[in-house]
Amino acid sequence: MKLFGTDGIRGKWGEAPLTEGTLRGLGAALRALYGAGPVLFVRDTRQSGPELTQALAAGLGGEVIDLGVLPTPALSAILADGTGVGGLVITASHNPWHDNGVKVLLPGGRKPSVEQEMLLEEQESAPASNLVTELRMCTVSTGLDDYLGMLQGKLPGLCLRDLKIAVDCANGAAYQAAPQILERLGAKVHAINVEPDGKNINLDCGAVHPEQLAKVVVEQGCDLGICLDGDADRCVLIDRNGRILDGDAILWLLREAQGVVGTVMSNAALERRLGEQGIPFIRAGVGDRQVAEVLRTKNWGLGGEPSGHILVGGGFPSGDGMLTALKCLERSHDITMELADWAPDPSKLVNVRVSSKPDLALIPGLAQREDQALSDGATRVLLRYSGTEPKLRVLVEALDQGSAERLAHSLADFVVAAIARI
């Protein structure tokens, strides 16, 4: 698809696909999808957020409600509560500040299917002009309190008065919400990266760079650290010893007997250990939408990705980083002890930029190189393109860290050189 990737639309504002004309056309196509009624907007803290909001709203026409800076899951929760006929999140999630994008949410707060996205792309280039009506846009400031109330309502009885918790808000959409919900629940909070300036979102901080918070947790003597990304749908935890715990560790902590859904990126140790307890495990494709679809099909309640996108039964339709962290604390106040024996297989993920994305199965010699890597000590090899960036992701798991790193870099170098020759 030319607009939509793994999780919405992303790019640089003013460059395809994020041009004013494209967004106006997309807005008109979305109005045709949503029908009449109020469409809700939230955004993260990127400098270009208000401009994208205006361009999309102009195309939508009709009633538009701007809720301001809020996490993606906040809008999902508000839509699930019955407000609005649909919603749009202006965000590029964990990407740098100069990128931005759009996440589309349907009535009820869920994400559209691939088929619906394809239809939107078709209609964007030739929108039905008779559906575009005069824009009636207003700003509402109650979204934060509404979201915090709904978040707290998912955790009846949870009290954190005995805990000191550090939270890294990535200078993003949860810079107000995350500290406030922890304080409401009684925790002593040490918050960092809560001063967004439009350009510092995700800058060496948050879920993509949890090392900063790991140091803070140890220095401040915290019981737990919570790392969020720019739009706060990801969560990475830090135990009191400064150990970084990704989405696989969280799935292991929250495991449910009926089954767990991971992705092709999930570490082999998660599947192996769940199997030892007789818990079914299914790998979905990358993206929380694909995880959600498998959960719906199996009627299970827990799934997610190593990146920290976690979906929990009884939660919101879109993954919520803070809800994930609080569900972990609901399971146990001592997450360090609960996960003391958790150990993923050594792995290395290499992200490299590519000039094009040819079918990996057609790259000469690649299959043989993967087989050789398995013979040289790799226990699992996965190569895939990013759905939102011009990047190849090479994941290698092995018996030791050195082998994983050596084999991952070797495979990445081989593919980049092969693509350059095509």
Image (cartoon, rainbow, N blue to C red):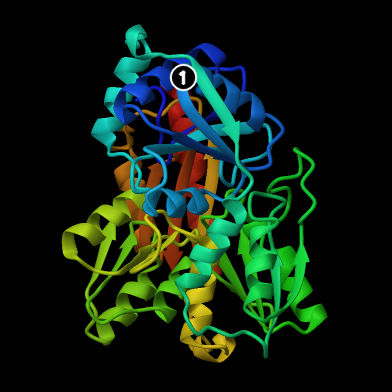
Q: Position of residue 260 (x, y in %)?
A: 29, 71
- Left-right relation of 395 to 120: right
* Residue 286 appears in view: no
For image coordinates 34% across by 65% down, the residue present is: 303
Locate the N terminus and report the quarter of the image it occupies. top left
For image coordinates 35% across by 60% down, the residue present is: 374
What residue sits right under mark 1 in the picture?
Answer: 61
- Left-right relation of 312 to 162: left
The picture quadrant where one finds residue 20 is top right
Up the image or down, 251 lies above or below 164; here it is above
Q: Nearer the viewer, residue 323 or 366?
A: 323
Up the image or down, 241 lies above or below 303; here it is below
Up the image or down, 217 lies above or below 86; here it is below
For image coordinates 43% across by 64% down, the residue present is: 397
Up the image or down, 252 lies above or below 172; here it is below
Q: Position of residue 74 (x, y in %)?
A: 51, 53
For image coordinates 47% across by 27% down, the residue present is: 63
Q: Nearer the viewer, residue 157 or 190?
A: 157
- Badge 1 amino acid: Gly
Q: Position of residue 61 (x, y in %)?
A: 46, 19
* Residue 422 appears in view: yes
- Left-right relation of 278 to 418: left
Secondary structure type for disc 1: loop
Q: Position of residue 259 (x, y in %)?
A: 24, 74
